[in-house]
Amino acid sequence: MNDAPTNAPVLVTGGTGTLGRHVLPRLRAAGRQLRVLSRTIHPSADGVEYVLGDLLRDEGVAPALDGVHTVLHLAGGPKGDDRAAVNLMRTAARAGVRHLVHISVVGAGRVPIGYFEAKHGAERAVSESGVPWTTLRAAQFHDLVFTVVQKLGALPIVPDPKVIRFQPVDSRDVADRLVDLVQGAPSGLVPEIAGPRVYTMADLVRSYLAARGRRRPFLPVPVPGAAGRAYRDGDNLSVDGATVGTRSWEEFLAEKLR
């Protein structure tokens, strides 16, 4: 078990995002006091204190960490995650944080695309900081996949990059796992978490179109270079021993379009 005092607040970065909205009530139900680092002002209530700060600009991080023994680092974006992690970990080390739990992405260090490379850089910042840590790599969330297929399904002709496959996972399953990790001891790189099935991009778009009662033609498109090779080899998919989420894409889609 985590030996940090249970009355000390857990600092959550990215607490207002998709994953944070699932994690916060679960941690509160577990009896944890929460402090959320946010770039915008939110009223504090129900055991959740919101504090202003910006990881990329390295603003407000030190005050947010005052009295904190455990950090759950969920904040992320299309770029800059490595720089944000460096800023967070430098300050966390100075503050004497005893456990930092970090969410990363399946494929970090394996797929040669900027997003995955930044995530891998963030992992290195965490592991090299001197702060005891746990990192969980998760597959793409159903929520993100839905946004992508919704946009593709609106096109008159849907591009079909046949080599790209996904193993989407429900963000609620990831939230459940993260709460367990926050309550436990630092464990380093733990088994990845992904959904119960692998799909091509076309599979996902067709399931969305079918659920909406629509049809579209598909046009095969190549994915060249090193990125294409990585996707053909399944480098963005989970490895043996991964934790498998319980909620399928089909269940999520039916719930979303209900």
Image (spheres, rainbow, N blue to C red):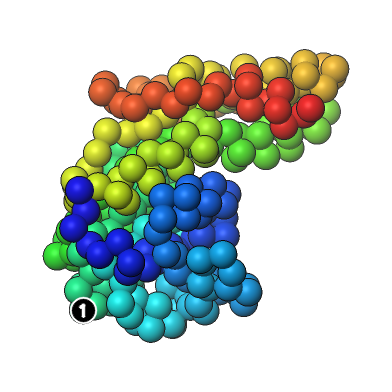
Task: Specify the quadrant that holds the C terminus.
Answer: top right
**Residue 54 spot, x, y in % from top left:** 48, 75
Residue 207, by quadrant, is: top right
**Residue 246 spot, x, y in % from top left:** 48, 23
Residue 143, by quadrant, is: top right
The residue closer to the viewer here, 137 or 71, is 71
Q: Residue at x 73, y 37 (%)?
A: 151
The amino acid beneath tag 1 is Arg
The residue closer to the viewer here, 152 or 258, is 258
Q: Is residue 137 left or right of residue 165?
A: left
Q: Residue at x 63, y 19 (%)?
A: 250
**Residue 220 spot, x, y in % from top left:** 63, 20
Determine crowd level at label 1: few under 14, some 14-19, many 20+ residues with C-alpha closer than 10 A. Answer: few
User: Can residue 46 be seen?
Assistant: yes
Q: How many marks?
A: 1
Identify residue for label 1: 94
User: Can residue 78 be seen?
Assistant: no
From the viewer's perspective, is residue 75 above or below residue 163?
below
Local secondary structure at mark 1: helix
From the viewer's perspective, is residue 257 above or below residue 117?
above
